Amino acid sequence: MDVLHTFVDDTTHPLAVLGRTHQQLAADPPLRSAHGMLLHTTQRIEWYAVGAPAPLPALRDRPVFVGRQRALVRLAQIAAGTRSLILGEQFVFRQVRTAAEQLPSGHPLLLLLVDALDLAEQARERFRLHTHMDYSDLPRFLLDHRDGDQARRLLVIGGGMLARAVATSPPGTYERVVMMTRRPRKLHRLVDAAGDITVVRAASVRKALGGRPYDAVIATTNLNPDYRSWVDAAAWSPRCDGVVDLCAEPALDRRPARYLHLHDPDVLETLAEANRDIAERAALARRWIAQRAEVLA
């Protein structure tokens, strides 16, 4: 049977619309389907299946593309980081691999995913798709202008892959990293070996910050009203010097001073600058993947 796929991404919808849809998915994820694979990242929501329609309203009116080769090209180009806001970024490969790992053993899409990930790895190596700035590096670029004379702390809100990457490689101007999460016990096991990281629940964050000035990085999903109020309080504290929001949709309805969201023009300009030296290689990699997929499909 033919593989079909459909998607919305930053070529079909504004980033703000995608962000809202992504947050809705995070707050109310669809049941895992035995028929296909749902891939959703900051800038895309995609459905791949064998003869099964997309389970999400956001995708039901979108064009459906049929054919293994076409699906292979798209998945490999995504996993290689050639369709990302930050070209060559590393997180999307893991996101595609994680989505593949959710498929049951023997699923008809598994071989497609194996081929796509292998093709993406080859493209990354062949075209040197290794960006010098990943999503986890954004706080380093956007907060490094802070005055380093006063000891400060970095508050990372979230416990997922991106939040952990920020916390374990923060800018060097911070004396300690505090992570605020709903599940501190699980996060302790993941970051205990990383050094000076304190993991706390929201109710204990003020004590962990010790009255020191701090910057905050928001990298979380499923901001229900109760948790959002804790995030809001942390961002609006007079001790908070600056906020970098890496959520798909802005975490705060009201913005304090020195607040930057992933989709703000200043941040997108930073990303565009970072992409300049890799854009040509990414375009070559996209074409190479399409050519190789003709052989593999």
Image: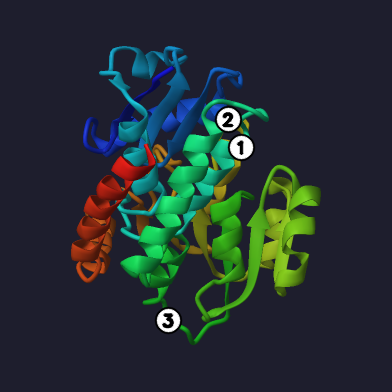
Image quadrant assignment for residue 145: bottom left
State how far apart marks 1 and 3 are (Cα): 30 Å
What residue is shown at x 22% (from left), y 31% (from top)? 12
What residue is shown at x 67% (from left), y 48% (from top)? 181
Quadrant for the C terminus in the image: top left
Q: Is residue 201 above or below residue 147?
A: above
Looking at the picture, tell me which residue is in the foreground, 149 or 15: 15
What residue is shown at x 40% (from left), y 42% (from top)? 42
Q: Which residue is mark 1?
A: 227
Looking at the picture, tell me which residue is in the foreground, 49 or 90: 49
Regarding mark 2 in the picture, which secondary structure is present there? loop
Q: Do the residues under discs 2 and 1 have CB atoms within 8 angstroms?
A: yes
Residue 168 placement, left or right of 259: right
From this viewpoint, is residue 257 visible? no
Q: Earlier in the sequence, mark 1 or mark 3?
A: 3
Q: Earlier in the sequence, mark 2 or mark 3?
A: 3
Regarding mark 3 in the picture, which secondary structure is present there? loop
Instruction: Give the amino acid type for the residue marked by disc 1 in the picture.
Output: Tyr
Image quadrant assignment for residue 1: top left
Q: Which residue is mark 2?
A: 224
Residue 105 placement, left or right of 225: right
Image quadrant assignment for residue 107: top right
Image location of residue 119, percent across then percent down? 41, 52
Kindly report which numbered mark, 2 or 3, lies closer to the viewer in this rendering.
2
Looking at the picture, tell me which residue is in the foreground, 257 or 199: 199
Residue count near mark 2 (Cα–Cα under 10 Å), binned few <14, some 14–19, many ≥20: few
State how far apart marks 2 and 1 are (Cα): 5 Å
Image location of residue 225, percent across then percent down? 57, 29
Regarding mark 1 in the picture, which secondary structure is present there? helix
Residue 147: mark in rendering: 3
